[in-house]
Image (spheres, rainbow, N blue to C red):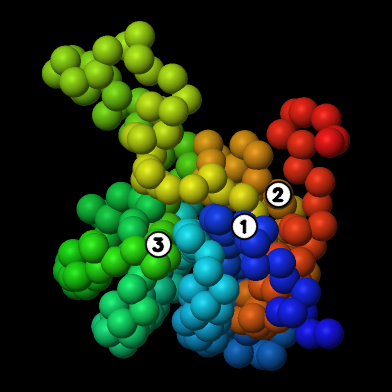
Amino acid sequence: MSLIEKIDKTKLPAHIGIIMDGNGRWAKKRGLPRSLGHSEGAKRVVEIVEASYKLGIKSLSLYAFSTENWKRPKEEVSKLMDLLVFYIRNQLSIIKKNNIKINLLGDINPLPEKVKKEIDIALSSTRDNDRMILNIGLNYGGRSEIVRATKLIYKDIEAGILNIENLNEGTFKEYLYTKGQEELDLLIRPSGELRVSNFMLYQLAYSEFWFSNVLWPDFTEEVLYEAIVDYQNRNRRFGGLNV
Ligand code: IPE
Ligand code: IPE
Ligand code: MG
């Protein structure tokens, strides 16, 4: 029985997050420059998006660039930005055809103009799609998302749009980048690191974590299926008891 056949289609994680890590180490192992690890990693993004929407995943959140990744050398940052522009341009028609909506996690203001332009096109031209939401974490940090939500809430209270008595976990969620989306059921981190590196801090309160030593450029559809099969064998109690 192949892995995909082991997946119970009625118990899919509604929302999967992936910390796409290990590009640099993948390249280093082969004596290649880090930039080649990033190009190879970008190819996996296309495959994993396709595998996810075919399975029927409702939201897929991919961590592409963190608020901390600005610490890297300029050339590496600009290589990552170039890859992003290339792939959005290249993949947008297929994304549209597959009815995928692109949503942004993060503040793109500090990004180069050409990247912002491409992202604006991607966001506006997929706005009405509803088969799957593809969240792209770009200049994203979980802490900064929570601070941003707090500021937006303050503004709404000041403007009389929100009454503080009505602020609860349900309303708070509406101020996050993932507003209106399903709970993050499964968080995947390849590359052997056992940390969340500031990804979706609020959303992961009850996520199942799945870690693997596979480096992102080696992350095939099969690895995704393996993570989902494992997820489906977990016992999620949400603080309750086994029934
Ligand atoms: C993930 O791979 C890509 C980004 C963080 C943008 P890394 O570049 O972090 O790869 P390693 O961790 O150095 O192997
Ligand atoms: C996390 O990977 C960020 C992304 C995958 C975009 P990093 O490589 O930046 O994380 P650390 O430095 O290992 O925590
Ligand atoms: Mg890394």
Residue at x-position 43% and y-position 20%: 168
- Residue 226, by quadrant, is bottom right
| Residues under numbered marks 3 and 1 in contact, where contact means CB atoms less than 8 Å apart | no
| x and y percentages locating residue 124 in the rendered image | 18, 64
**Numbered disc 3: secondary structure:** strand
Q: For the point 36% across and 70% down, which residue is it?
A: 100
Q: Taking 172 as reference, is 97 left or right?
A: left
Residue closest to the far left: 159
Of callouts 2 and 1, which one flags the residue occurring earlier in the amino acid sequence?
A: 1
Q: Nearer the viewer, residue 76 or 88?
A: 88
**How far apart in space, not on screen, are marks 2 and 3 (Cα)?**
20 Å
Q: Is residue 236 visible?
A: yes
Quadrant location of residue 193?
A: bottom right
Q: Which quarter of the figure is the C terminus placed in?
A: top right
State if disc 1 and disc 2 touch (CB < 8 Å). Answer: yes
Which residue corresponds to mark 3?
A: 133
Q: Which residue is mark 2?
A: 208
Q: In what element is the residue under mark 2?
A: strand
Percent of width and height locating residue 158 = 18, 15
Q: Is residue 190 left or right of residue 24?
A: right
Name the amino acid, label 3.
Ile
What's the amino acid at mark 1? Answer: Pro
Q: Is residue 214 visible?
A: no
Alpha carbon distance from label 2 to label 1: 10 Å
Report the disc number at residue 13: 1
